[in-house]
Image (cartoon, rainbow, N blue to C red):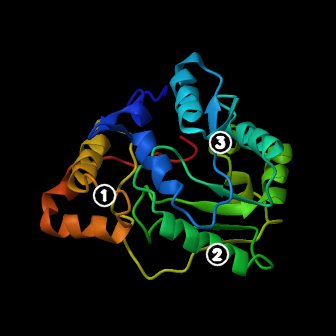
Amino acid sequence: MTSTRLPGKIMKQVCGRTLLDFHVSRILKSHRINRFVLAITTNASDDPLEKFCIDADIDYIRGSEDDVLARYYQALQEFPADIIVRVTSDCPLIDPDLMDQVIQYYRDHRERYDYITLGPINFPRGLDVEVFSARALEKAYLHGHEMHQREHVTPYIYRENSEFSCGVFPSDHKLGHHRWCVDEPEDFDLITKILTAFKGKDNFSWQECLTYFDSNPDWMTINSAIKQKSLKE
């Protein structure tokens, strides 16, 4: 809610619905997730998010704004789990079927990997999903002390610690040039076009989204000038 580039972005509306509503309703179509928890801050600006959770009967916790890693660990303490699936709320086009594939891949290779993610060059930005063990999250919480480790939750697992075995969900796609997350006004303009094109249909796939770009090539230019922020910026 306190985004400096696009304040209140997840509560912005398209077709009479908030981006958060699109995001959550798509996640809840997953067949592999047992429990969904929204990890929001204690800031008064996030009170509307708490109301959203209460109205929708969604589990939530409230914690530190800056220490997102602590917020995730708090969620784990209140809602114990063996496997954590992390998605960020600025991804209203998140695909539940793709999420399920990543989750199942992790489960099938759990003896080999502590952490699995989508490759940054394989899928559009905004479909991002990370799957990792509760043990890895606890280790990150206890030993990841750098600011970027606390803010971005998982860098201690996949960057700084050779204790963990990390992998990428296998794919031959090269679609990382697509940007479907919402950080800037131009991102919101693009997402508005996509969600409007699917008005009345909630279960569209990420592949169906791509078909609209084939018939509307100008959409690629809407947010193409935005540079993805580095984890350490």
Please state which of residues 113 and 13 is positioned toward the viewer in this rendering. 13
Residue ID for mark 3? 148
Q: Indicate the secondary structure of the residue bearing disc 1.
A: loop
Whether residue 119 is visible, yes or no, is no
Residue 95 quadrant: bottom left
- Residue neighbourhood size for the residue with mark 1, other residues' Cα within 10 Å, grouped as few (<14), some (14–19), many (≥20): few
| Position of 173 relative to 209 (above/below) | below
Assess whether mark 1 and mark 3 are in contact (beta carbons under 8 angstroms).
no
**87 sits to left or right of 197:** right
Image mark for residue 104: 2
**Residue depicted at 83% across the width and 65% down the height:** 163
In the image, what residue type sits under mark 3? His
Please state which of residues 34 and 12 is positioned toward the viewer in this rendering. 34
User: Viewer-nearest of labels 3 and 1?
Assistant: 1
**193 sits to left or right of 21:** left
Distance Cα–Cα, label 3 vs label 1: 37 Å
**Residue depicted at 84% across the width and 58% down the height:** 135
